[in-house]
Amino acid sequence: MQNYKKLGIEHFLKKDFKAAKVYFSLAYEKRKNKRLFNFILLCDLALKFPKEAILLFEFYLEHYSVSKIDKDFEEIFKTIEAQNEKKSQNELEDGHALNYQDFLKSEQQIGFKKSFENVINSTKLVIDNRDDFLDFLEKLVDNGYKDMTLNYIENVLAHFWANEKFIRIQEKLIGFKSENQA
């Protein structure tokens, strides 16, 4: 029989938080207890705030045998979550940048157009990865933001001119333009 808890810990320590959550969830299904549930919460936290979650995970493992660890864990966890939520909210209110991964999470919840409108109206979007940028351009085209896509393409053409995905995006944009002219 698999020791899912042990596998979850191993994957968490490797920073594979999604796999760790799966293993902890499997362990929780077999034997529902507060500590396994806390490991699942840590995985969720790690997906949003890995540094804080890793520190709390190490603390939790180190004090795992202490009887009141669950109460201490809950207090620390709530404090970290509250601070991070407040920090995220303040960044959005202050007009700070939103990273692309957070944008994708928002897109899953409310759709591309609404997420994009929120970014345009309230903050900047920071994309620090070529593939993410190309993905973003493709989504712009697919969602009807042709002029904006064209502006981006004109600005980055020298950097992406030979990239196959970039060329496909340009062709898709050209296809949209010729459809509208017909």
Image (cartoon, rainbow, N blue to C red):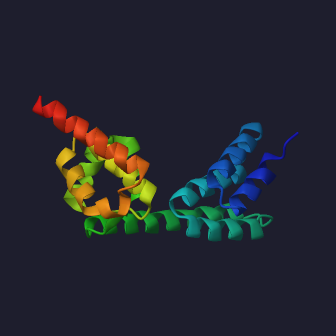
Nearer to us in this view, 61 or 69? 61
- Which quarter of the figure has residue 76? bottom right
Residue 72 can be seen in this image: no
**22 relative position to 106: left or right:** right
Look at 20% across and 45% down and name the residue there.
Answer: 146
Residue 107 can be seen in this image: yes
* Quadrant of the snapshot with the N terminus: top right
**29 relative position to 47: left or right:** right
What x and y, as percent, mark residue 69?
Answer: 71, 65
30 lies above or below 58: above
What x and y, as percent, mark residue 137?
Answer: 32, 50
Tally of marks: 0
Nearer to us in this view, 140 or 88? 140
**57 relative position to 112: left or right:** right
Nearer to us in this view, 166 or 26? 166
- Which quarter of the figure has residue 13? bottom right
Nearer to us in this view, 126 or 45? 126
What x and y, as percent, mark residue 22?
Answer: 67, 44
Look at 25% across and 53% down and name the residue there.
Answer: 118
